[in-house]
Amino acid sequence: MWSLIYGKVVKLMQKDRITGLPVFEDFLSEAGAIVSDRSRKYLIVAADICDFHYINTNFGYDVGDEVLKDVADVITNFFSSESLLICTRAYSDHFIGLFSCSGYSENQVYEQVVELKYNVAKAILKHVSLISPNLNIGIHYLEDNEENIISAVDKANVARRTGKGNYSIPCVIYSEHLMEIKENSAKILPIFEESFKNEAIRVYLQPKISAETKKLVGAEALSRLVGKDGRIIPPNMFIAALEKTGKIVDLDFYVLRYISKLIHKWIEQGIEPVPISFNLSRLHFFNETIVEDIIAIVNRYKVPPRYIEIEVTESVFFEEADVIIEKVEKLRNFGFKVSVDDFGAGYSSLNLIGILPVDVIKLDKGFVKDSLKTKRGNDIIKGLIGILNDIKLDIVCEGVETTEEERIIKDYGCTDIQGFLYDRPIPVCEFEQKYIS
């Protein structure tokens, strides 16, 4: 669209019909012109709404459009015009903004992101319930005077995707290391496929210790891949890649079969097993036979279900909640324990307590550590643990690293501890030597 202004023909920016923001193509043109002036420092922010498809599917597209409009309003009204230079809804629920960061430290940017996410969460909760609203945010600082706007947007999106779904981190800042991780993801799948076929995936166990007796009460099973050079590939290098391709389902079942065989061996040796937990990805719940498949595996190895604990992350329960809760109830009715992992990492954890059919709450390590830093945080975690005890839920505090942290959460009523204070995840043979034999 063109117009005659002050005797000059200029192009007017087209507006997105829902948010009123400039369309993506006009954003690129305008942002590119802005950053050509290198007298200021700039950053690109890429953001998307966690599980936006759930809002559209369960509340309707009209509600989804209202959410998009309110999120756009929060973003544009939160920042000053000197800070936010131009913003767009690139597509669907994806927003891109160009900011001036002159005079701002990285810590100040970080604090602004935390406050923005809180305001966005409040705006979303005006329209929907039983959801843990969150923004996935990636940031790229334009430090290269020759870098064009398209490259800058791509890098912000790489950072955004790296932290996608992780409620415990406010944002991810782009670095060359992230690009290496992206490239490494393409190398992960062949390694996983070969390891899976040859049953060479390593399973580690991290002990859970009673806060009262200091004795072993359980363990969590965690997987590790081994590269061709013999080095261990950590989970942050392969879990995201497996989730994107759906291969995480194969990994979860691999771990379940492994711990079922291990528990069967202990029983055959006359050893009383401790319950072992394993993580169940949200992708499993889209499988109609997930309950029957899990039961079939433990029955094959003649393992009493009380020795298997199924961990599901807090955020999973906000996707198709009714269907997931129904399947969780079936698993519990068969005799499995079910725990909520990363509890406290989202915004609406307290909404979950009254409706979830679970046995164990695992308090997120970031939530625990942040809460113990301030008096208000201490009061919150003390009150939360008190509520969980009152309704007869077991509590595991994750990420405990010091005796002082242990003392505080024990005094507050935490049942069990999992963290480096007692042990890191270790190979099964080492676990058996230290805790079983």
Image: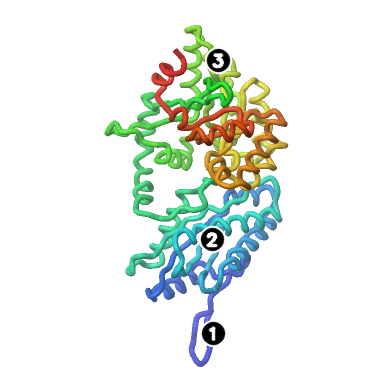
Mark identifier at residue 112: 2
Of 176 and 333, nearer the camera is 176
Query: Which residue is rendered at x = 52% and y = 20% of the image?
Result: 216
Give the image location of residue 410, x and y in percent: 59, 31
- In the depicted structure, whether residue 330 falls above or below residue 46: above
Residue 294 visible in this rendered orientation of the protein: no
Query: Along the polypeptide, which appears first: circle 2 or circle 1?
Result: 1
Give the image location of residue 359, x and y in percent: 65, 28
Q: Where, by quadrant of the figure, is residue 151 drawn?
A: bottom left
Q: Where, by quadrant of the figure, is residue 413 drawn?
A: top right
Mark 1 in CB contact with mark 3 (< 8 angstroms): no
Residue tagged by mark 1? 3
- In the depicted structure, whether residue 170 falls above or below residue 79: above
The three-letter amino acid code for the residue at tag 1 is Ser
Mark 2 in CB contact with mark 1 (< 8 angstroms): no
Residue 266 visible in this rendered orientation of the protein: yes
Of 367 and 178, nearer the camera is 367
Query: Which residue is rendered at x = 69% and y = 42% of the image?
Result: 351
Mark 2 in CB contact with mark 3 (< 8 angstroms): no
Within 10 Å of disc 1 (Cα), the crowding (few <14, some 14-19, many 20+) is few
Distance of label 2 from label 3 (alpha carbons) = 50 Å
Mark 1 or mark 3, whichever is nearer to me: 3
Mark identifier at residue 303: 3
Distance of label 2 from label 1 (alpha carbons) = 37 Å
Within 10 Å of disc 3 (Cα), the crowding (few <14, some 14-19, many 20+) is many
Query: Which residue is rendered at x = 46% and y = 53% of the image?
Result: 172
Say which quadrant the C terminus sits in. top left
SS class of the residue under badge 2?
helix
Query: Which residue is rendered at x = 48% and y = 48% of the image?
Result: 163
Give the side of residue 59 with respect to residue 220, left or right: right
Query: Along the polypeptide, which appears first: circle 1 or circle 3?
Result: 1
Mark identifier at residue 49: none
